Amino acid sequence: MLVLPVVWLLSAATVYIAALRSGMKALRWALAALITGPLLLPLFNSHKRLLLNKVRGRNTMLFRP
């Protein structure tokens, strides 16, 4: 019973830190993660990738090791 709220809080903290590191609006993403929990992670990753492509341009290639 205690596991679900802990997972929700950890995912919100993780998304908050990732948004800060990416230069995105961290509080908005953290609140969304508090509401949806770990279900937000795919949306967050795709939004981060779209912003990165917008900044760098379409014809550039990202380094993918």
Image (cartoon, grey):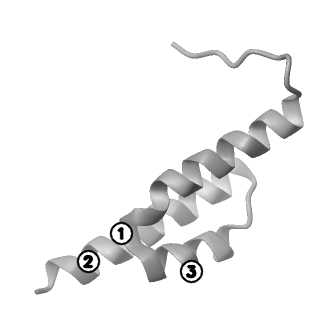
C-alpha span from label 1 to label 3: 12 Å
Q: Secondary structure at mark 1?
A: helix
Query: Is 2 above or below relative to 60?
Result: below
Task: Write down the quadrant of residue 44 in the picture.
Answer: bottom right
Q: Which residue is mark 2?
A: 6
The amino acid type of the residue labelled 2 equals Val
Report how far apart the C-alphas of labels 3 and 2 lie in the structure. Answer: 15 Å
Around disc 2, counting alpha carbons within 10 Å, would you say few (fewer than 14), some (14 to 19), or many (20 or more)? few
User: What amino acid type is highlighted by mark number 1?
Assistant: Leu
Secondary structure beneath label 3: helix
The disc label shown at residue 10, or none: 1
Would you say the residues marked 1 and 3 are in contact, meaning their CB atoms lie under 8 Å apart? Answer: no
Q: Which residue is mark 3?
A: 31
- The correct choice, above or below, for 35 with respect to 61 in the image is below
Which residue sits at x=55%, y=59%? 17
Residue 1 at x, y percent in the picture: 10, 86
Q: In the image shown, does 30 or 54 lie closer to the viewer? A: 54
Q: Is residue 32 left or right of residue 50?
A: left
Residue 36, horizontal then vertical, whole percent: 44, 76
Q: Is residue 42 left or right of residue 46?
A: left
Disc number at residue 53?
A: none
Residue at 56 percent across and 80 percent down: it is 31
Mark 1 touches mark 2? (CB < 8 Å):
yes
Image spot of residue 49 (x, y percent): 67, 40
Alpha-carbon span between mark 1 and mark 2: 6 Å
Number of marks in picture: 3
Q: Earlier in the sequence, mark 3 or mark 2?
A: 2
Residue appearing at x 56%, y 65% in the figure: 16
Badge 3: few (under 14), some or many (20 or more) residues near its Cα, within 10 Å?
A: some
Mark 1 is surrounded, within 10 Å at the Cα level, by few (under 14), some (14 to 19) or many (20 or more) other residues, namely some
Q: Amino acid at mark 3?
A: Leu
Q: Name the N-terminal-most of marks 1 and 3.
A: 1
